[in-house]
Amino acid sequence: MMADELFWRRAVVCGSALIYWGGVMVQARRVRRKIGRSPNMKPRGLKESLLWIGWLMVIASWIGQPMLVGSTDASAGLRFIPSLYHNAGFVAGLVLTAAGYAGTLWCYAAMGSAWRIGVNRQEKNSLITRGPYGFIRHPIYSFQIVMLAGGICLLPTIASIVILAVHVGCVLIKAVDEESYLLTVHGKEYRDYMSRTGRLIPRSIRSAA
């Protein structure tokens, strides 16, 4: 493999993780200024704490794995899967990474000051149905998955696949918790919203499949 290409694969994956999670902190600060308090940045309860541990592992691996892959003495999980390491994967990885982050910014714009990290069951938040939320109930999670899929294309290792799998597991649990809270807050309005949208992919795509 060409050293320059490997450098760029590593740089895109590591850089995208730093930009993404740095952007989360910027977004949290922006929302905090608007609402006058934290947008639920601390986990509440055991389940949320465990989810945060899972996400911290994902974030650390997303940032750290690029520094470990590609060496001749890398462990099995950090060795490239030969059938997935090719130029088309490099291009696909760039496209998915860029699309995932652009989609995330779209979500931020749609959510505005209603954006939150965690669930506060004492709070009644607005129900956002504009932008990507008109098709998907949890598009931020969907776009995170798109970015991590791009990471698999760029650094096709077992570790990359495990990172994505752990993340998907965490977001599915989190999505169900958020939906339970929103059903309590918005009742029939949210139930109707659920009937016309998909959790992580648009309902129309899921129906066609």
Image: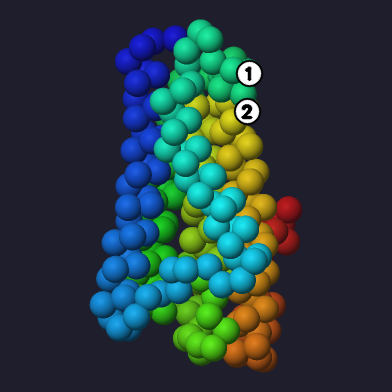
Which of 149 and 157 lies nearest the eye of the viewer?
157
Callout 1, which amino acid? Ala
Which secondary structure, mark 1? helix
Mark 2: few/some/many CA within 10 Å (<14, 14-19, 20+): some
Residue for point 44% across, 33% down:
64
> Could you say which quadrant of the image residue 45 lies in?
bottom right
Q: On the picture, is 115 further left or further right than 19?
A: right
Mark 2 vs 1, N-terminal side: 1
Q: Is residue 22 left or right of residue 76?
A: left
Q: What residue type is labelled 2?
A: Ile
Q: Residue 136, position in %: x, y?
A: 57, 67
Query: For the residues marked 2 and 1, what is the alpha-carbon distance in whole angstroms?
Result: 8 Å
* x and y percentages locating residue 137 in the rendered image: 58, 70
Q: Which label number is shown at residue 137?
A: none
Q: Dot 1, crowdedness within 10 Å: few (<14), some or many (≥20)?
A: few
Residue 196 located left or right of residue 13: right
The reply to whether discs 2 and 1 touch (Cβ–Cβ < 8 Å) is yes
Q: Could you say where residue 82 lies in the image, as x and y percent from the top left?
A: 59, 15
Instruction: Give how far across and how far down residue 54 sits, in percent.
Output: 59, 51
Write down the residue under mark 2: 158
What residue is shown at x 32% (from left), y 47% (from top)? 19
Q: Residue furthest front?
A: 46
Q: Quadrant of the N terminus?
A: top left
Quick check: can you spot residue 30?
A: yes
Task: Check disc 1 and report the residue beneath it.
Answer: 76
Compared to 56, does 115 lie above or below?
Answer: below
